[in-house]
């Protein structure tokens, strides 16, 4: 692994853009037998992120569907990743059996399109770094959990170096000013993320139902999205709201 890791680091140091970095990671993971990955950066010190950085090789259709349905709020991998500081394996039939409700339905849906199990590397740094690298296995791999555990340490190292490289590329390419939501916008999105209707939120906050809708619309505009669900996911990933997940 030493030679492979050194080659990976050298290639990362030579790239100029985030897309080039994605190609280097894609190649390194393919050499280990992984055909899909997703890297998410929520916070990098000194980088004023206007939005989470998502680098992935999943299908755009699945990513759009995931966001449209606010799956981040029910995804058991996200929930575990926020709590864990070490890589963990997820998925498989046994894992899906212990889930219930919306989380189980989401994982079954992912399984149907070939995302059945994988490994996630949570990244919680001393300076507040927050990110994660997730790799998914092809469906035809025999003994998937043995395969994942075999490469656990290699993927952990790849994830840490990739995260550090992303910090440099993000700072080099520049970022927009940090987004800000008003207190009312945050409150309306938070209650919406917990399944409250505009009317229910209006009763809780003691404002009109139309005012609730206006706050959600203004939050969507600031976040650069066109739906309430997109706004909830993006605000949650940016740390602007903290719904119960």
Image (cartoon, helix red, strand yellow):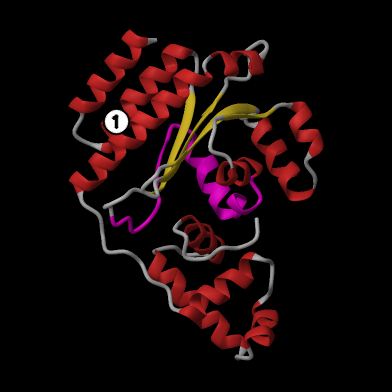
- Total numbered labels placed on residues in the image: 1
Q: Residue at x 18, y 34 (%)?
A: 16
Q: Where is residue 25 drawn, in percent x and y?
A: 36, 25
Residue 239 at x, y percent in the picture: 47, 60
Q: Is residue 5 left or right of residue 229?
A: left
Specify the farthest residue to the front.
Answer: 126
Which residue is depicted at the point 29% across and 15% down? Answer: 6
- Residue 88 image position (x, y, % from top left): 60, 30
The magenta span reads 48-75
1 falls in the magenta region:
no
Q: Quadrant of the N terminus?
A: top left
Give the answer, above or below, for where 72 lies relative to 110: below
Question: Which residue is at a point 65% across and 28% down the rendered structure image?
Answer: 116
Which residue shows up at 58% across the image and 50% down it? 72
Label 1: state its secondary structure.
Answer: helix
Q: Quadrant of residue 221?
A: bottom left
Would you place residue 189 above or below residue 212 in this image?
above
In the picture of the structure, the residue carrying the numbered disc 1 is: 21
Residue 52 on the magenta span: yes
Q: In the rendered image, which quarter is residue 83 located in?
A: top right
Mark 1 Cα-neighbour bin, 10 Å: few <14, some 14–19, many ≥20:
many
Q: If the image is split into quadrants, where does the C terminus sit?
A: bottom right
Is residue 26 shown above or below 31?
Answer: below
Specify the quadrant of the image occupied by residue 93: top right
Q: With respect to residue 19, does 75 lie above or below? A: below
Q: Nearer the viewer, residue 207 or 45?
A: 45
Q: Position of residue 109 (x, y in %)?
A: 68, 38
């Amino acid at each position: 692994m030493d030679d492979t890791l050194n080659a990976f680091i050298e290639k990362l140091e030579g790239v100029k853009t985030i897309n080039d970095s994605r190609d280097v990671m894609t190649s390194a993971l393919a050499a280990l037998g992984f055909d899909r990955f997703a890297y998410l950066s929520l916070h990098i010190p000194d980088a004023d992120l206007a939005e989470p950085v998502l680098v992935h090789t999943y299908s755009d259709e699945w990513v759009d569907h995931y966001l449209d349905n606010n799956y981040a709020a029910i995804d058991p991998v996200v929930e575990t990743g926020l709590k864990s500081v070490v890589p963990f394996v997820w998925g498989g039939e046994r894992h899906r059996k212990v889930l219930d409700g919306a989380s189980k339905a989401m994982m079954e849906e992912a399984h149907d399109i070939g995302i059945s199990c994988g490994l996630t590397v949570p990244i919680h740094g001393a300076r507040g770094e927050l990110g994660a690298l997730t790799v998914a296995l092809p469906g035809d791999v025999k003994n998937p959990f043995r395969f994942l555990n075999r490469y656990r340490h290699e993927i952990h190292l790849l994830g840490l170096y990739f995260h550090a490289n992303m910090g440099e590329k993000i700072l080099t390419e520049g970022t927009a000013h940090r987004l800000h939501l008003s207190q009312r916008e945050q409150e309306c999105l938070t209650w919406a993320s917990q399944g409250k209707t505009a009317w229910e939120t209006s009763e809780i906050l003691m404002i009109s139902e139309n005012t609730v809708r206006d706050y959600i619309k203004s939050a969507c505009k600031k976040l650069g999205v066109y739906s309430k669900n997109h706004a909830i996911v993006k605000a949650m990933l940016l740390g602007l709201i903290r719904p119960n997940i």
